[in-house]
Amino acid sequence: MHLKRTNIQNTDNGSYILLNTSKTGSQVKIPLPNYSIEIIDKYRRKSKKFVLPQLSNVNFNKGIKELIEVAGWTYNYSKIRFKQGKAVEINNPKGNSFRFCDHITAHTMRRTAITTLLLLGVDENIVRTISGHSPGSKEFYKYVALVQNHLNKQVLNAFEKLIISSQFE
């Protein structure tokens, strides 16, 4: 939301976002795919310093929830919090369970992007730099552990396929 026109760098090799991360204070240069440039060009405001229209965090998260609702992800999905070590379901103001779309926020998108990059094999040091996590960040390694569990399942599944296929030879 706070991306400024000065944060976009266009070169012969492509377009990039240049940012100083708020968590680590380091500068990051992130390559942009062509579709993101099309979005930036569509919303670029020449009279203002920001690239995209400005929304409050509340309105941005509200828009995300509406988008997820339109996508059809409206099934019930409990919101669980722990009180004194016991799981307690939290209901919406009408006393009903929350829907999946009610849980989604900008932070969910951030977590999904980090997990997706790791699943696609992007080196964890690069993902950590892009996401602004510091080396040794406990929060970041939750993503690594999640991805490692997924990779372990995939490898074990491949081993099973090898065993089955070798039995038929």
Image: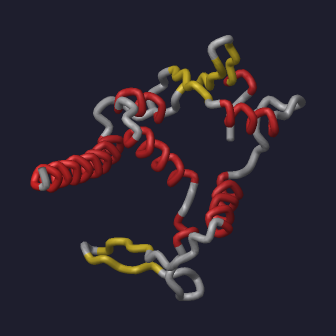
x then y, percent, for residue 8? 69, 23
x then y, percent, for residue 32? 61, 28
In this image, 47 relative to 140: left or right?
right
Residue visible at 31% across and 77% down in the picture: 87
Q: Is residue 53 above or below residue 164?
A: above
In this image, 4 relative to 89: left or right?
right
Q: Looking at this rendering, what residue extends furthest in the left direction?
A: 167
Q: Is residue 115 above or below residue 157?
A: above
Q: Looking at this rendering, what residue extends furthest in the right direction?
A: 47
Q: Is residue 68 above or below residue 93?
A: above
Q: Nearer the viewer, residue 97 or 116?
A: 116
The quarter of the displayed image where residue 129 is located: top left
Residue visible at 71% across and 58% down in the picture: 59
Q: Looking at this rendering, what residue extends furthest in the top direction?
A: 12
Q: Is residue 163 above or below residue 16?
A: below
Residue visible at 66% across and 22% down in the picture: 15
x then y, percent, for residue 134? 37, 31
x then y, percent, for residue 6? 72, 21
